[in-house]
Every structure is written in C-alpha cells, then in structure tokens.
Amino acid sequence: MCDKTTAEQTSTNPAARDRAAASESGATHVIAAPNTQPVTGSPLTEADARHLRQTFDIARRARTHGNMPFGALLTGPEGEVLIEMENGYFPDLDATAHAERLLATEASKRYREPFLATCTMYSSAEPCAMCAGAIYWTGIGRVVYGLSEHALKTLTGDHPDNPTMDLPSRTVFAAGQKPIAVEGPCLEEEARAVHQGAW
Ligand SMILES: [Zn+2]
C-alpha cells in the first residue's frame, strides 16, 4: 500500500495535473506512464512497483560495495529508466553522497527542468531533508519511495553512520514554491527487508 500526497491537486505540472484530474473524477489509481496497469488496491502502477523494487536491488548492490543500503533511480515520462544511483559514501567518504542527492545532481547536469518535471524519482527509502532539497532544486516532478524516514529511524536508531532525521519529505516540499507529487511509503515491508542486518 502507498500513501499519497494531496499537494499535487493544485499542480501546474501537466503530468501531476492529469493525476489530480483522475483523482477528482473518482479514479482510485494513478497512471504515471502509458501502457501500465495499476496494482490492485494501491495507487502504484505495475511500472511504479517494478521501478521501486529495482531501487531495492540497487540498495542491496550498494551494500555489497561497502556502502549503506540505499538506492534510487529516475524514469522519464514514458517510464524509461534514465539514471540509477547507489549510496556513494565510499570511496570518497562523502557524507552528502546519499543516492537521491547524487541522482538529483546527475539529473540536473544531464537534463533541464521542464523535462525533469515530467520525471519520477524512485527511492528505496524516503528522501531526507538534504535530498528533498536537492530534488526540489533540480525540479523533478514526482517522488515514489519505499521505507519512510520514521520507519528507517526505528531501524537505524542513533547509528553513527546514519543518524536518521525523521523529517517527512512532504514537509520539506511543502515549504517550496513548486509542486512535487509524492507517493510513499510504498511496499514498505519489502523496503524494510533491504536493511536486515545492516544496522
Ligand atoms: Zn538523503
């Protein structure tokens, strides 16, 4: 299951506006990309669920590389995967190298904001305040995440490598001036399993 923000109801983003219109018309599912089917009982499409599960695999891969188990990817308006990113603390000991921040930076270098507004970032865990800020400044139009920051904090506690901030990304986005559609937490039990034995 997946929580869904209402911020997009006032969106000027065409994709978000379409989703808002679908919501107002009584539709219970969000269609994020063409040729995809909604997952029963969830606002996630099959493509959303597939991409989100892909971030879980990326997070597991990050762990095999000695990094923390976080992963993210960016899809374009047709659902095509544009960028994948692992947590990147090692090898440079970059404490700002969260997967979503690295992805936002790479996306900003490659694409311009009108296009990024039509893109979706999938993340194995909810973007922290820093990453939500990077997403905002990059102009990515939609975020789908697995594990919530709150749930992550219950796993990491005060672990020195990941003192989780426990701040909803929606709170960060709500302070901004452009709409960002947010869906999450989604597939949270699968997202939680990624962290088994990591903390
Ligand atoms: Zn972060």
Image: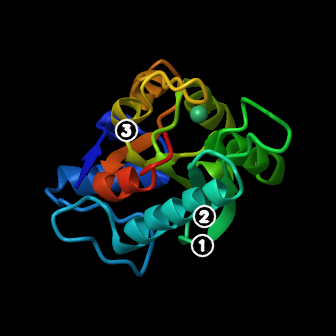
Query: In this rendering, which labeled residue sits more in front, label 1 or label 3?
Result: 3
Q: Quadrant of residue 160?
A: top right
Question: How far is mark 1 from mark 3, CA to CA?
Answer: 25 Å
Mark toward the start of the polypeptide (1 vs 3): 1
Taking the spot 65% from the left edge, 32% from the top edge, the residue there is 134
Q: Where is residue 60 drawn, in percent x and y?
A: 56, 60
Q: Quadrant of ligand 1?
A: top right
In the picture, the disc for residue 148 is: 3
Question: How far is mark 2 from mark 1, CA to CA?
Answer: 5 Å
- Number of labels in the image equals 3
User: Is any part of residue 175 visible from this angle?
Assistant: yes
- Callout 3: few (<14), some (14-19), or many (20+) C-alpha neighbours within 10 Å? many
The answer to whether the residue labelled 1 contacts the one labelled 3, judged by CB atoms less than 8 Å apart, is no
The answer to whether the residue labelled 2 contacts the one labelled 1, judged by CB atoms less than 8 Å apart, is yes
**Whether residue 106 is situated above or below residue 158 in the rendered picture:** below
Q: Which residue is mark 1?
A: 80
In the displayed image of the protein, which residue is found farthest to the bottom? 35
In the displayed image of the protein, which residue is found farthest to the top? 175
Query: In this rendering, which labeled residue sits more in front, label 2 or label 3?
Result: 3
Question: How far is mark 2 from mark 3, CA to CA?
Answer: 24 Å
Q: Which residue is mark 2?
A: 76
Q: Nearer the viewer, residue 171 or 140?
A: 171
Mark toward the start of the polypeptide (2 vs 3): 2
- Callout 1: few (<14), some (14-19), or many (20+) C-alpha neighbours within 10 Å? some
In the rendered structure, which amino acid carries the disc numbered 2? Answer: Gly
Taking the spot 65% from the left edge, 39% from the top edge, the residue there is 98
Q: Where is residue 95 drawn, in percent x and y?
A: 73, 29
